[in-house]
Image (cartoon, rainbow, N blue to C red):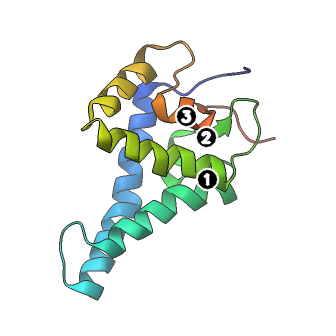
Amino acid sequence: MMVQNPGGFWRRLLGLLLDAIVVGVPLGILSYILTGESEGNTLTNLLSFLYYLILPVVWMGYTVGKRIVGVRIVKVDGGKVGIGTMLLRTFVTGLVYAVTLGIALIVSAFMVGLREDKRGIHDLIAGTYVTTDKPQ
């Protein structure tokens, strides 16, 4: 495993919050305009899922929030993430978090904060990590 320059907990959390603001709020407004529903509708959930699934694949591991804070998702061998990797990271891990009623999410947050390689459960499942390294 070649984890180099891992992105820490606070940087990753800030990237996630920025994604929620920069992407989530406009998606919510657009969805409300189109559907009239203000919370948790299918369109917002689908677009959000596609954002986290596809954008890192086409933008060298970045989402908008990750790009702003200077971190990106890569495979443990340093390679570019693909759709399969991102499906594991988003969908399968989401199922694990749901089945454990959020306990695995809390454990994962502690793992990112305390482990030397800063990898959470979602990273271990997908074979990824978050790094501060720029793309080659």
Give the number of the mark in front: 3 or 1. Answer: 3
Task: Name the residue beneath numbered marker 2.
Answer: 73
Residue sitting at the far front: 99
In space, the residues marked 3 and 1 are separated at their CA atoms by: 17 Å
Q: Are marks 1 and 2 in contact (CB under 8 Å)?
A: yes
Q: Residue furthest bottom?
A: 34
Residue 97 image-quadrant placement: top left
Question: In percent of the image, x 35 and y 66: which residue is there?
Answer: 45
The front one of 88 and 6 is 88
Indicate left or right for 82 with 107 as reference.
Answer: right
Q: Can residue 62 be seen? A: no
Amino acid type, residue under disc 2 in the picture: Ile
What amino acid does circle 1 point to? Pro
Secondary structure at badge 1 equals helix
Name the quadrant of the C terminus: top right
Is residue 70 or residue 33 the one in the foreground?
33
Of the numbered discs 1 and 2, the one sitting upstream in the chain is 1
Find disc 3 in the rendering and name its residue: 125
Q: If you read the primary sequence from the N terminus, does the residue marked by circle 3 or circle 1 appear first?
A: 1
The three-letter code of the residue at mark 3 reads: Ile
Total residue callouts: 3
Circle 2 residues within 10 Å: few <14, some 14–19, many ≥20 = many
From the image, state whether disc 3 or disc 2 is nearer to you.
3
Quarter occupied by the N terminus: top right
Q: Residue at x 51, y 40 (%)?
A: 69
From what the image shows, is residue 2 above or below residue 98?
Answer: above
Q: Give the residue number, with chain letter if any, for mark 1.
A: 56
The picture places residue 89, in percent across and down from the top left corner, at: 53, 44
Residue 48 vs 13, above or below: the answer is below
